[in-house]
Amino acid sequence: MYDGGKILIGLIIFAGLVTFPLWNNIGKATVKPDPKIDTPEIQKMAVKKCVEPKAVMKTVHMKMLNDWRDAVVREANRVYIADDGKQYAMSLQNTCMKCHSNKSKFCDECHNYAAVSPYCWDCHIKPKEKET
Amino acid sequence: MINRRQFLKIAGISSIAGLGGISVSNVLKRNWLEASQVEPDPKAIVGKRWGMVVDMRRFNTEEDYRVVMDACHRVHNVPDIGNPKQEIKWIWKETYEHAFPSQEFENPYIEERLKEKPFIVLCNHCDNPPCVRVCPTKATFKRKSDGIVMMDMHRCIGCRFCMAGCPFGARSFNWRDPRPFIKKENVEFPTRTKGVVEKCTFCYERLATGLIPACVDASREAAKKAGKEPGLIFGDLKDPNSEIREVLSSNFTIRRKPELGTMPSVFYIIGG
């Protein structure tokens, strides 16, 4: 092999650079997202319950929001009948965020961790949060 | 060794078991969204074809115009950008020659007073809306239930075909982030973002919760205070007993640019 030494050194440097993110983060514990649902509005509730059970909300909230926006904007259906028969106005600003008034601790906590940036707040007005 | 016959048997049985397994697990694993139910708000005001009459006899002072325009722009977070090239407007004042250009041909000798008077104009919610026809994403669409020409801001890609298509200039493009230009945000309603087109939506969000459009409401309130008749009348054009039909059948009204065949749903009583 011609210039074997140079090639090997080059390969080692290359492998090192490519794997930099891996070995750079070894041993460093990333902070797990810890969304908070302890807003004053939720504290006041007698039965602390979201529109659907927590597990469902966790997995399908994004699809649900998509369905809600189409139902409201395009079909003029504004009322959501939950699984337990309760009715809710389908509105991000006026229903979801009325309880979850802590956007930075509720939405952003996981979204930042998962590196997703939904563009809801370009138009929808986020709730005013008190500095804690 | 298995022979061909045995192999086919095993393959057939296992594929049936596999397919069956998928469908069984789909039945057991509930699809929450498919099962969910939605319905309209029972408080909603429903109509077959919404329309409006603008009674220009009731618009005389600066205040008369300001009341209706402010009411709309306040409720819908319409920014006041100041620069006419980037202006956002849902309901605004227009000169006679711009509002009714064809009238110049029909009657060049019309009352001088009319030619100087500003007219209140808004989206006409046409029966045959050219903006809907040109929209490539169906972000603007005509609601089948009540004829409102709607905007779905989630879908608008800002191509501005609709602005070219609309012969009434009823649409405004957000050249910049409108938020800094909104004096006081209505937190119940969203704002818009840079790069989308917006216009009057006949207050679909208010109709859905049982309220009449903001401009009509403001016009009524102001008229009641002054002991006069309101300048804006809103109602169902398909309902022969509605107030709007009563007004239309007892007054001479014109529409903007009728020669284009877009069939506006906004009618004007221009004088009298």
Image (cartoon, coloured by chain):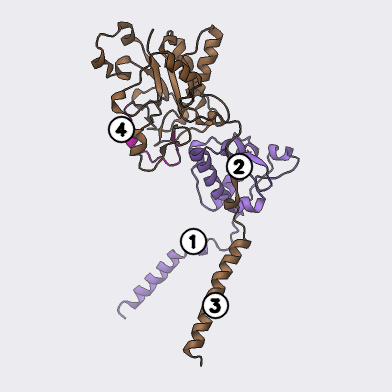
**Residue under numbered circle 2:** A80
Residue A21 is tagged as 1
Q: Amino acid at mark 1?
A: Pro
The answer to whether B246 appears left or right of A126 in the picture is: left
Q: Give the quarter of the figure containing the N terminus of chain A.
A: bottom left
In the picture, the quarter occupied by the C terminus of chain A is top right
Label 2 resides on the chain identified as A
Which region of the structure is painted magenta? B150-167
Query: Circle 3: is it few (<14), some (14-19), or many (20+) Cα within 10 Å?
Result: few
- In the visual, does A56 lie left or right of A75? right
Q: Are marks 4 and 1 on the same chain?
A: no
**Front position in the image: A55 or A126:** A55
Q: Position of residue B136 (x, y in %)?
A: 35, 42
Q: Is residue B189 above or below residue B74?
A: below
Q: Position of residue B199 (x, y in %)?
A: 42, 29
Query: Marks 3 and 1, how far apart in space?
Result: 44 Å
Q: Nearer the viewer, mark 4 or mark 1?
A: 4
The answer to whether tags 2 and 3 share a subunit is no
Q: Secondary structure at mark 4?
A: helix
Q: Amino acid at mark 2?
A: Tyr
| Residue B256 visible, this angle | yes
Colour purple maps to chain: A
Of the residues tagged 3 and 1, which is closer to the observer?
3
